Image (cartoon, helix red, strand yellow):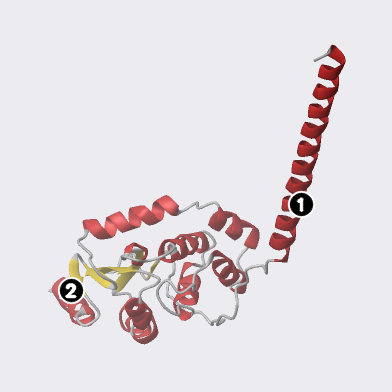
Amino acid sequence: MSKRDDQKKNKKARQQKGRIYWILGIVAVAVVVVLVLVLGNRPAQTAGEFTRITPNPRPQADGLSMGDPNAPVKIVEFADFQCPGCKSFFETVESTMVEKYIATGEVYYTFSPFSFVDEFPGAKGSESKDAAAAAYCAADQNKFWEYHDMLYTNLSGENSGSYTQVRLLAFGEALGLNMTDFKTCVTSNKYQQRVLEANSYAEKNKVTGTPTFLVNGVTADTTTLFDTIDAAIAKGSN
């Protein structure tokens, strides 16, 4: 084969190679365009319908606590924001307890998140922990109890999408929070570690279900709570 033939052959090979690269480039551009169109036309996630609330009044509310810090009886409520029993306690019992014991100065009450529903076998997502972290963010603006009420009011079931991030943000907006600060707090996972520490605190106190209450260190559930409070008050008055 002559030198000229070699040159022609090499030139032809370069041309074929160039065409292949050109075709691949067109395909790559087409793929990018399709992805942009598909993603661009994807409907944005929305909060959907949710119930606005009038928050329940809490005497001497301070962060996750309420009542007189010098009250003779100290109660810690361990609760998961996805727990149906906790929602029921909020809706049917808590206001009576506030009126009977907290507003009278006999009880100092603290809410302690125990976000364990996420860890059930087969559970998807992290709605319990996300809701607790968002509640801590609301507490930064002295709105914990308002946010607490909003969460339970809008709980529709465990791992059901009640507490997607867009809904957690919408709850804050509905309560009149400073959304710049609140959104930064929620999206940065500022309180992720605090939520885990709260879980460890519950486990340290041998809490295995929610709602569970510590009344001056004595464990109670919803059926024994008022009797345990009365006993603690009587003991303190002796």
Quarter location, residue 224: bottom left
* Of 86 and 166, the residue lying toward us: 166
Q: Residue 68, image x and y in percent? A: 35, 69
Q: Residues within 10 Å of mark 1 (few under 14, many from 20)?
A: few
Mark nearest the camera among 2 and 1 is: 1
Task: Answer above or below: position of 198 versus 220.
Answer: above
- Looking at the rendered image, the quarter that the C terminus falls into is bottom left
Looking at the image, which residue is at 24% across and 58% down? 203
* Rendered location of residue 116, percent (x, y): 33, 64
Label ID, residue 30: 1
Query: In this view of the protein, which residue sits in the foreground, 74 or 22?
Result: 22
Q: Amino acid at mark 2?
A: Ala
Type of amino acid under label 1: Ala
Residue 210: x %, y % from top left: 28, 72
Q: Quadrant of residue 155?
A: bottom left
Apparent side of residue 199 relative to residue 188 in the rendered image (left or right): left
Can you see residue 72? Answer: no
- Number of marks in the rendered image: 2
Residues 30 and 222: in front is: 30
